[in-house]
Image (cartoon, coloured by chain):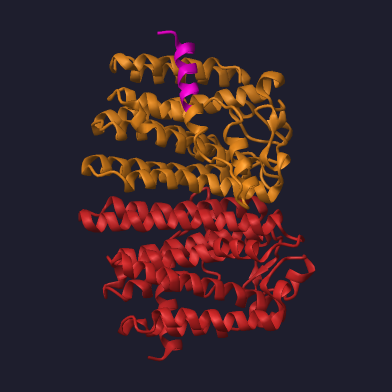
Chain colours: A orange, B red
Amino acid sequence: MDFKDELNKYIEVINKELNKYIVTSECPENVLNESKRYSLLAGGKRLRPILLMTSYLLFREDVERCYKYAVAIEMVHTFSLIHDDLPGIDNDDYRRGKLTNHKKYNEATAILAGDSLLNEAYRIIISDIKSTDDTIEKNRKIDALYELSHGIDRMIAGEYVDTEYEGKEISGEYLEYMHENKTGALIKAPVKMGAILAGAEQGDINKLEEYAEKIGLAFQIKDDILSEIGDQEVLGKPVGNDRERGKCTYVTKYGLDNAKKMLDDITEEAINIIKNYNKNSEFLIELALYIKNRNK
Amino acid sequence: MDFKDELNKYIEVINKELNKYIVTSECPENVLNESKRYSLLAGGKRLRPILLMTSYLLFREDVERCYKYAVAIEMVHTFSLIHDDLPGIDNDDYRRGKLTNHKKYNEATAILAGDSLLNEAYRIIISDIKSTDDTIEKNRKIDALYELSHGIDRMIAGEYVDTEYEGKEISGEYLEYMHENKTGALIKAPVKMGAILAGAEQGDINKLEEYAEKIGLAFQIKDDILSEIGDQEVLGKPVGNDRERGKCTYVTKYGLDNAKKMLDDITEEAINIIKNYNKNSEFLIELALYIKNRNK
């Protein structure tokens, strides 16, 4: 398996699926739809939908059955980015090298575009559940939707803790709580959702949940490292902002070298959980390494 | 039936139910929860949950079975108010005579409190669906949830059109489109949800939908009239703002007298749809009159 080829194949599938939604037309709220599309299709690693799909693929092959859920999780992620970037929260002008939603459009549009994307994610899944006849399948979908709603709840709580403690010294415990929720929850949710949708056993779901927790933490530590020493051109956003704002991150709290060591350790732990899983786990192993080694 | 007594009884039930949710505790996001409670319990007419419950009561007596849905619709309504009040949208300092969420807390908290209330509404209902065994009941709940997600989608679109056209002259068609969505959608949704949850026939649901459309429009026209000539003390918010901001309303577009005439006509139409319905429709008739005659 060539990991990069696989990864790009998934990204292509997801972008194609995303492109089917929020078709703009001559309705009075057309610019709102445009702004939703703008942020949704502004690039991005598509990590969350990929996790959902590859988690599903550990147990079942008919991955197209979970496309709507992959689309929904990316919409939720996009909603959270649009709102985080707002003047009232992080006040960021650029995201992925492009103007943020409120800079490209305006603040009112960005608030409503975020709200609407969150709601659209639910609407797509609920509509899918509504049209599912098979009882077992229907129940799995409801369970997956519940995981999503729980993940979003935790993500918002984490984001709140992040804004609340900006510029304040916080304990390692709080830092972990913040990230477990802010970033971790929406990495854990798609992994669990994929497994639930595929009808995995509870024991397998638990194991995957552990893997997801590890890579979620790794993802955040890497983000903090890139925010400190990344390449602004490659990242598409300013570097060094966290320190300036007095944000408490793994780098500002533990120092760069310790943060790197933590990232190595946690990645190895994640790989150990998944490595003897089954033949399809190879991609998830490579994905853990990709999270560790990415430069954007 | 004494309408005011009935109304207050419903409000009491709803406030008691709402009070059970978002219990604050010693978690790091405690202030976020406080701010959600603050706005949720800041008074309000509780029109949407009352509509849901009384629509349900047309067909079934065990109204406590739809309490969670009544709570959810009020959370959605509260989310929409918090976001509408934000500096980036209406920039209002007061709501129901109390400081708006972002004035009482701060902007970041208000954005996240709104997001979180919207999500919480979904989570409560999804959790209820997840724990429902009976297939028929489960399907009704899913249908009701779909109505909710559709209503929210339309509400956000309407709010967008409202902000987009502020200060611009718009056609009567656009004004109607805006209100049908902005206010109407979240009045129609609970009426339909109540009927769906109670297992009403499609013909009955359609009739109720028509009633809801009429009172939704009446509600908006009355709001516009109150915004122009209401008592600031009673309303708990400034009067005359719409005109100052160049907002296009039924009053600014058609004049006060015409707006009053429209309100009378539409209320009569709503009552005609429901009046020979069944013995429980008396409350909904009185409610249409209450919407017309309210002073806040």
A268 or B56: nearer the eye? B56
Relative to A184, A222 lies left or right: right
Is A270 above or below relative to A3? below
Residue at 49% over, 50% down: B27
Report the predominant secondary structure element of the magenta stretch: helix
Relative to A118, B5 lies left or right: left
Residue A45 x/y as whole percent: 54, 25
> Which residue range is magenta in the image?
A1-14
Is B158 above or below relative to A11? below
Farthest top residue in view: A2
Is B4 above or below relative to B27? below
Farthest left residue in view: B134
| Total numbered badges shown on the rendered structure | 0
Res. A173 in view: no
Q: Is residue B250 magenta?
A: no
Residue at 69% over, 27% down: A97
A247 or A227: nearer the eye? A227
Looking at the rendered image, the quarter that the C terminus of chain B falls into is bottom right
Looking at the rendered image, the quarter that the N terminus of chain B falls into is bottom left
Residue A113 x/y as whole percent: 60, 46
Residue A103 x/y as whole percent: 73, 40
Residue at 61% over, 58% down: B159
Residue at 54% over, 58% down: B155
Farthest bottom residue in view: B2
Q: Quadrant of residue B23?
A: bottom left
Residue B64 x/y as whole percent: 31, 70
Q: Quadrant of residue B262?
A: bottom right
A227 or B260: nearer the eye? B260
Res. B252 in view: yes
A16 or B102: nearer the eye? A16
